Amino acid sequence: MSITAAQVNELRKVTGAGLMDCKKALTETGGDHEKAIDYLRTKGLAAASKKAGRAATEGLVGSYIHAGGKIGVLVEVNCETDFVAKNENFQAFVKDIAMHIAAASPLYVRREEVPAELIEREKAIYREKAKESGKPAAIIEKILDGQINKFFGDICLLEQAYVKDPDKTIQTFLNETIASIGENMTIRRFAKFVLGEGLAKKESDFAAEVAAAAGV
């Protein structure tokens, strides 16, 4: 059966799991919302939602330097307690996220950060391309939804395929780590530096702060 974007979004709100995980859960359970929740819980992907409302004010700013010092990444990951911030698994997660950012070059952490005008510009481009194919308006809108989701998957960190395990998204990796560690965690902000170039993520407030501190 066909799984709609509305079904996926509703499941995501309830469980806190990633979009692709929610879609897979609904597909595996024939679109049954309750069974999909149970499916995500058995995979350890819904456990994070129970902790999502808890304040995450501790954590680390991690770094990763690559290519002989020509590429550098700073990323802030928050957790609930200083105890967990010192945990080896948490620190390894922060390191892996920094390495992923160096390799995948996201522009934003989550889709909610993407400026509305940028989304509308992308939609306009995809819509015009679809119109040229002569497809009906209803089909065009479905194509548009798919294209925009792919666009978010390209530029938003949480929706990117994890470079060390492309079968899962960064959101899935985050949820799994939350379930394993037992505390709420959030990836707050990041900045990527490439020698001789501007900041790869100019829109980040973190990047602006780092640039100001460096006198750039």
Image (tube, helix red, strand yellow):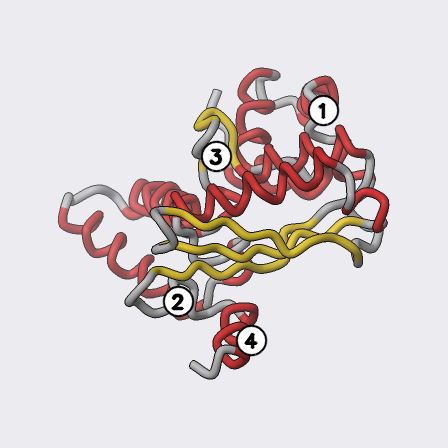
Disc 3 designates what residue? 162
Query: Is the residue marked by circle 2 packed among few (<14), some (14-19), or many (20+) residues within 10 Å?
Result: some
Closer mark to the observer between disc 2 and disc 1: 2
Q: Nearer the viewer, mark 3 or mark 2?
A: 2
Q: Which residue is mark 4?
A: 209
Secondary structure under the numbered disc 3 in the rendered image: strand
184 vs 68, left or right, is right
Marks 3,4: beta carbons within 8 A: no
Reading the chain from its start, which is encountered first: label 3 or label 2?
3
Can you see residue 145? Answer: no
Label 2: which secondary element: loop
Identified at 48% across, 58% down, the residue is 108
Q: Earlier in the sequence, mark 2 or mark 4?
A: 2
Above or below 64: residue 183: above
Q: CA distance from mark 2 to mark 4?
A: 12 Å
Q: Which residue is mark 2?
A: 199
For disc 1, the marked residue is: 44
Q: Amino acid at mark 3?
A: Tyr
Residue at point 48%, 76% (across, down): 211
Residue flagged by tag 1: what amino acid is it?
Gly
Q: Earlier in the sequence, mark 1 or mark 4?
A: 1
